[in-house]
Image (tube, helix red, strand yellow):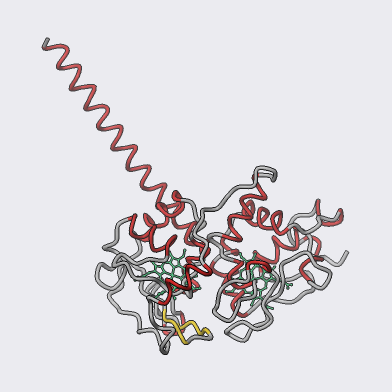
Amino acid sequence: MRTSSYLTSVLSLTLLVSSQAYAGNDQADSVKRGKYVMDIGGCVSCHTDKKYKGKELAGGLGLPTPFGTFYTPNITSDKEFGIGSWDTEQFIQAMTKGVSPDGSHYFPAFPYTSYAKMTRQDLVDLKAYLDTVPPVAKAAPEHDVPFPFNVREGMMVWKALFFDDSPFKQDPSKSAEWNRGAYLVNGPSHCVECHSPRNLLGGLDTENLLAGEPKSPEGEKIPSLLNSDESKFSKWSHTDTVFGLQMGMTPEGDFLGGSMGKVIANTTGKMTEADLKAIAAYLGKPDNKKTATNEPGQDKSGS
Ligand code: HEC
Ligand code: HEC
């Protein structure tokens, strides 16, 4: 009797200790993965205002749109001014449904339209990381958006028309690499949000995804990423794409700037080579013989 209860307590103690150690590792892994999810999601590009020496993720950056200027909120772990008091489910709801913990609708200047495609695991990890971001006790400015576009209820109608919150679907006829690229481009890395034309109400033109946007709200000319005769990009090899997204230099010898400069600094420049190759595979550029065997950049040496 005594032996068996002794055994039971040793056993349960062992189980307890090892499960706690496991939980600890698990949490640390989740935070580490979450940092990478933040990078591929480009949160820093919008939620950090470098101009005013803003702290990372403390918000305050103005985003001009045809409807007015939106200011990004503080998403540090501050419990009052940031999202430190949110639980993981509230965070996932904001990211995938565009709905805040108090039930109001977000404006699509926050690209939840793409983040809705993110996997639950990625979002859980991202929240674990955000919980470790030092709190900044600072409120972001109010949006400067005139009536009627400032009415959050109006977003219900907008969402019904333009928001597809279905999860990302793998295409089993394609490789795992291609599917990873499709996930990044349409999900966390939200390349579609800038590289596609929009209709008058700011909805993505889903028939022409990645066809480019001749005049963005910032007044930029955003090139097509489709394989068409007119696009410069369709002449890029996979190696050119990986190198361009890593270093910001095009095979024509130009440097990518404007808002793409931020994407390279905060997103693609921080991606693993495997993820960059996945994007190149998904964007489907013909991999010609000259560059296929080269390492990124080697085909720039004048041969
Ligand atoms: C293109 C710019 C942009 C990017 C990129 C972006 N956000 Fe935002 N985000 C916004 C804007 C604008 C709002 C405010 C929306 C509103 O008020 O309706 C917002 C709101 C939020 C909110 C709601 C905060 C609150 O207080 O209610 C969360 C959470 C959030 N973003 C998280 C993220 C995360 C995490 C990432 C990266 C994966 C990210 N955002 C990337 C622009 C962006
Ligand atoms: C915030 C808006 C924005 C986002 C998000 C964005 N881009 Fe861009 N991208 C641009 C702009 C603007 C340019 C043009 C830059 C220039 O000409 O200096 C550009 C240029 C490019 C080019 C060069 C194409 C050419 O023909 O020269 C490639 C390739 C590219 N982007 C890929 C991507 C990929 C892949 C993603 C997602 C990981 C992405 N972009 C996300 C705005 C964006």
Q: Residue 115, image x and y in percent? A: 49, 61
User: In the rendered view of the protein, which quadrant contains the C terminus?
Assistant: bottom right
Nearer to the camera, 112 or 260: 112
- Residue at the far right in the pictured view: 303
User: With respect to residue 300, does 4 lie above or below?
Assistant: above
Position of residue 134 relative to residue 87, above or below, is below
For the N terminus, the quadrant is top left
Q: How many discs appear?
A: 0
In screen coordinates, is 30 left or right of 193?
A: left
In the rendered image, residue 173, in percent from the top left (x then y), is placed at: 69, 43
Seen from this angle, which residue lies furthest left? 2
- Towards the viewer: 298 or 198: 198
Q: Who's the residue at 38% across and 71% down the image? A: 105
Q: Residue visible at 64% across and 47% down?
A: 171
Query: Of 296 and 203, which appears nearest the observer?
Result: 203
State which quadrant residue 60 falls in: bottom left
In the rendered view, does 44 fall on the left or right side of 11?
right
Q: Position of residue 109 (x, y in %)?
A: 48, 75
Left-right relation of 240 to 76: right
Image x and y of residue 48, in percent: 44, 75
**Which of 300/18 is in front?**
18
Q: Quadrant of ligand 1?
A: bottom left
Q: Residue at x 47, y 87 (%)?
A: 68
Determine whether 29 is above or below 153 in the image.
above
* Residue drawn where x is 68% and y is 54% of the image: 277
Dividing the picture into quadrants, the one containing residue 26 is top left
